[in-house]
Image: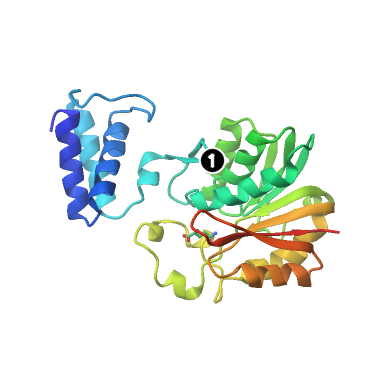
Amino acid sequence: MDMVMTGRRWVAKQLRKAGLDEDTAQWESRILVEKAMGFTKNQYLPTTTTMTQEQQDTLIQLTSRRCDGEPLQYLCGEWEFFGISFSVGEGVLIPRQDTETLVEAVLRLRRGQNSTALLDLCSGSGCIPIAIAKHLPAVQGDCVELSADAFGYLRQNLERYDVPITPWQSDVFTPPETLFQRRYDVITCNPPYLTAANMQNLQREVQFEPAMALDGGTDGLAFYRRLIPQWKTCLKVGGWLVTEVGQGQAAQVAAIMKQADLRQCHTETDLCGVERVVLGQLA
Ligand code: GLN
């Protein structure tokens, strides 16, 4: 397998043996070969290109890790979200397409505004605040992440895109007092929301992701119950709290928002037709 073509065929075969379907195996084989050769996605890599011994060794290693279930995104070290490439790796939740629905909802809310004060809770890689900041004028604010591993990626991504959002390494339930003094136009959050049953039944790749970013307690709603009443006080009058939710949780989260006196509670649907985002406004 000293050529890209033979390398890809070999990788695809291993991935199929490990249980991936044909299309996915083909697609991932291309990405893994590109990664092993240090190519970026936007370059064309001719299939007749020769691979050095070192590149072949790297490819063998990457393939074996992938066959053991490690997510492709961690092996690449980068993943695209909302058209932006984020550094990711073990210890941080991989940005998902579902979450683009939340970003789009915020862009619609803030269209035409000159500036936006934004707070993002449970930030992970920082994909939400960075995508928002890249698409709205004069976004500034704060974001909060507890995990030391995730915080490293968060800081790296904020620096990489030069976004004026300050990262705070803290529990969202016991934040630095200064944060509570601030007032925001928008507070976003994609908290852990999987149920105890979901946690027992994770897809193989998801088992490599931090449980801390996934586990939302017995019914998955533990974070919403505490976060919503606690942080709504940091909204400006007219400001919006915007949260991602798991499948089937929208009505319950909207009820928690109403109970916390937020108004205009409504939901947004993702590309799969799942009610994925719940919004509420401080009147
Ligand atoms: N969407 C993730 C999953 O289903 C869960 C992320 C979260 O809990 N916020 O794997």
Q: In this view, does 189 lie to the left or right of 234?
A: left
Q: Can residue 57 be seen in this view?
A: yes
Residue 207 percent coordinates (x, y)? 39, 61
Residue 57 percent coordinates (x, y)? 20, 35
The amino acid type of the residue labelled 1 equals: Phe
Residue 269 percent coordinates (x, y)? 58, 58
Residue 244 versus residue 12 in the image, above or below: below
Q: In this view, does 171 lie to the left or right of 41?
A: right
- Asked whether 147 or 33 is in front, the reply is 33
Number of labels in the image equals 1
Determine the residue positioned at 22% across, 57% down. Answer: 19
Residue 103 percent coordinates (x, y)? 62, 46
Determine the residue positioned at 77% across, 37% down. Answer: 112
- Please identify the quadrant where the N terminus is shown: top left
Q: Is residue 126 visible?
A: no
Residue under numbered circle 1 = 82
| Image coloring type | rainbow
* SS class, disc 1: loop
- Asked whether 127 or 265 is in front, the reply is 265
Q: Where is residue 266, by image quadrant?
A: bottom right
Determine the residue positioned at 53% across, 66% down. Answer: 247
Q: In this view, does 27 lie to the left or right of 92?
A: left
Determine the residue positioned at 35% across, 43% down. Answer: 75
Q: Assess disc 1: are there few (<14), some (14-19) or many (≥20) residues with their C-alpha within 10 Å of its C-alpha.
A: many
Residue 147 versus residue 246 in the image, above or below: above
- Asked whether 215 or 240 is in front, the reply is 240
- Please identify the quadrant where the C terminus is shown: bottom right
Q: Establish whether ligand 1 lies closer than 8 Å to the Cβ of label 1.
A: no
Residue 272 versus residue 199 in the image, above or below: above
